[in-house]
Amino acid sequence: MFLALKEMGYSKLRYSLIVGIMFLIGLVVFLLSGLADGLSQEFRQVVDDWDAKEIVLSDDANNILAASQLKIEDEKDISSNDKAPLSLYSGAIGKKGDKVNISLFGTDKDAFFLPEITSGTTLKNDNEVIISQNLADKGFKVDDTIKVGSNDLKVKVVGIFPATSYVATPVMYSTVKTATEIKFGEDMVKNTDNYPINAILSNDKDTTLSSDSLTKLSTDEFIDNLPGYTEQSLTLDSMIYVLFVIASAVIGIFMYVITLQKTAIFGVMKVQGINSWFISKSILAQSFLVGVFGVILSGVATYFLSLVLPDAMPFAINITQWCIYGAILVVVSTIGGLFSIVTVNKVDPINAIGG
């Protein structure tokens, strides 16, 4: 390590360039990681908030919430100590030219998964909604009357709960009747109370189904089937994994070139009785230090960069994952130095010093 530090101190510019390259690779890795986590949270956050043990969908829905078609009466085919219906409407609210996409969930007024209210009151009547804080941040507030969908029904905002999202859209909750009227129109709710729904959430791990037309999923299985969720995660993760390979290759190439330039020096060192393993340890130590310096600098830079990113860019800091990725970058950087060891072992002292 002493030899490695002395040489790095002597060739500051050369090793600064290598650290700079490692810094840029680390910066991209941490940025992609933050974006992947941010997008993941925006897609799944409300599902995590439900904290449901199992989610029941229609068997022919291919595990997709929007494709599931159930009715309120299907609850009788589900044995659970605590269950509640869920209907989904995806639409937009706001004034023309300034609309916000939303996901509206209809459920019972006492459903176990309804969030705690931070302002106003919870659902008490039909034609009322509670909204997430990220909608409140866009200018919607308690006592506002808003129009949702294409019909003339207007709903009143009675409460606000902590920010959450579903498939990257803010969330609202209403009663099943209100959600049905918004989605299908007034005629649908006039002559029946057997409203169409998309799912039934159960807070019981021992949920049993008495109908072959139903299927149940765990929360993790449900999330994996969110439209685009798995594909998005795989794409960003694959980019990060490729960067690990690039980091190893780049550090390996630079260290190899530097080793070739120092062949004569290594020859002199061998003549003086310094063995190849001692020299090789110095090269590995340099590769390790390049990785450490690059990762630390890129991690700090990414954190401060995250503070100035626009709100529209989903970005989440996962310290545990950053530590894992940082450790991997240091390891692949060190592995890159292994390519130079073969060259060191092949150095012939006589030829190296021009004998």
Image (spheres, rainbow, N blue to C red):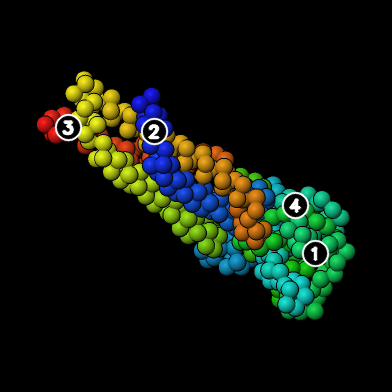
Q: Secondary structure at mark 1?
A: loop
For residue 75, above or below residue 29: below
Mark 4 is on which residue type?
A: Pro
Question: At label 3, which amino acid type do we have?
Answer: Ile
Q: Position of residue 216 (x, y in %)?
A: 57, 54
Residue 284, above or below 145: above
Q: Which residue carries the number 4 mark?
A: 162
Q: Residue at x 35, y 43 (%)?
A: 251
* C-beta proximity under 8 Å, tags 1 and 3: no
Which amino acid, mark 2? Answer: Tyr
Q: Is residue 331 visible?
A: no
Image position of 314 (left or right of 173):
left
Labelled disc at residue 353: 3
Residue at position x 45%, y 49% in the image: 25
Q: Whole-percent x and y of residue 333?
A: 38, 40
Q: Find disc 1 in the rendering and name its residue.
A: 139
Type of amino acid at the residue the image marks with label 1: Gly
